């Protein structure tokens, strides 16, 4: 299948995502920091990069910007626990193909990877991109007014599904 690089400073996250992706037939490379991600990108030439936003040496956004500056058609999906709409928009504007909120399910990860690999590498301008729309039923617990817990949902820009935890 495809060559995928997982960039996350958490060994547990890398190991978990590796198992999921290898069980789906992908070849997986790992990077524990932003700098090693940039080096590994050129060494392994992955078809897709799964990138965490929060790392010690360099932010995921900076890694994303550098990868896109060096190779404009680089396929990158950001995976982060920061699931605010503003973060998702910044990630999209920075050139990511998709955004996936943590914690990640095996099905959600595989679906997102397949969509990113099957999608076009050419990006639409933000103004040309269709508005996000629901693409999967919400299977989360109902909203609890007492604690203001919001339901997660999956939204999409183009062909890549992205979960969003905050319902407007």
Image (cartoon, grey):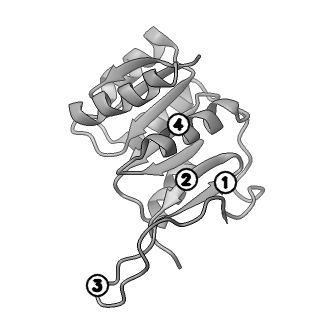
Q: What element carries label 2?
A: strand
Label placed on residue 106: none
Mark 1 Cα-neighbour bin, 10 Å: few <14, some 14–19, many ≥20: some
For disc 1, the marked residue is: 157
Question: Which residue lies at the image location 51% right of the left edge and 19% below the top edge?
Answer: 26
Q: Is tag 3's residue or tag 1's residue first in the polypeptide sequence?
A: 3
For disc 3, the marked residue is: 147
- Quadrant assignment for the N terminus: top right
Q: Is tag 1's residue or tag 4's residue first in the polypeptide sequence?
A: 4
Disc 1 from disc 4: Cα separation? 17 Å
Percent x, y of residue 34: 32, 30
Verify CB contact (< 8 Å) between mark 2 and mark 1.
yes
Instruction: Let me know if residue 153 appears in the view.
Output: yes
Percent x, y of residue 123: 71, 41
For disc 2, the marked residue is: 162
Q: What element carries label 1?
A: strand
For disc 4, the marked residue is: 110
In the picture as drawn, the residue positioned furthest to the bottom comes out as 146
Mark 3 Cα-neighbour bin, 10 Å: few <14, some 14–19, many ≥20: few
Instruction: Let me know if residue 10 appears in the view.
Output: no
**In the visual, does 70 lie left or right of 87?**
right
Q: What element carries label 4?
A: helix
Disc 2 from disc 4: Cα separation? 12 Å
Verify CB contact (< 8 Å) between mark 3 and mark 1.
no
Q: Is tag 2's residue or tag 3's residue first in the polypeptide sequence?
A: 3
Percent x, y of residue 24: 51, 25
Q: Is tag 2's residue or tag 4's residue first in the polypeptide sequence?
A: 4
* Residue depth check, mark 3 versus mark 1: number of the one nearer the observer: 3
Verify CB contact (< 8 Å) between mark 2 and mark 3.
no
């Amino acid at each position: 299948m495809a060559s995928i690089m997982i960039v996350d400073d958490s060994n547990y996250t890398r190991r978990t995502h590796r198992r999921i992706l290898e069980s789906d037939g992908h070849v997986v490379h790992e990077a524990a920091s932003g700098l090693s991600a940039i080096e590994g990108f050129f060494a392994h030439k992955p078809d897709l990069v799964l990138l965490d936003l929060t790392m010690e040496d360099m932010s995921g956004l900076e890694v994303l910007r550098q990868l896109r500056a060096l190779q404009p058609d680089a396929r990158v999906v950001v995976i982060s626990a920061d699931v605010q709409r503003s973060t998702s928009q910044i990630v999209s504007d920075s050139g990511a193909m998709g955004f996936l909120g943590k914690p990640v399910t095996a099905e959600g990860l595989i679906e997102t990877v397949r969509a990113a690999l099957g999608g076009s590498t050419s990006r639409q301008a933000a103004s040309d991109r269709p508005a996000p729309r629901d693409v999967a039923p919400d299977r989360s617990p109902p909203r609890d007014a007492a604690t203001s817990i919001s339901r997660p949902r999956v939204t999409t820009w183009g062909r890549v599904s992205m979960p969003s935890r905050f319902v407007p």
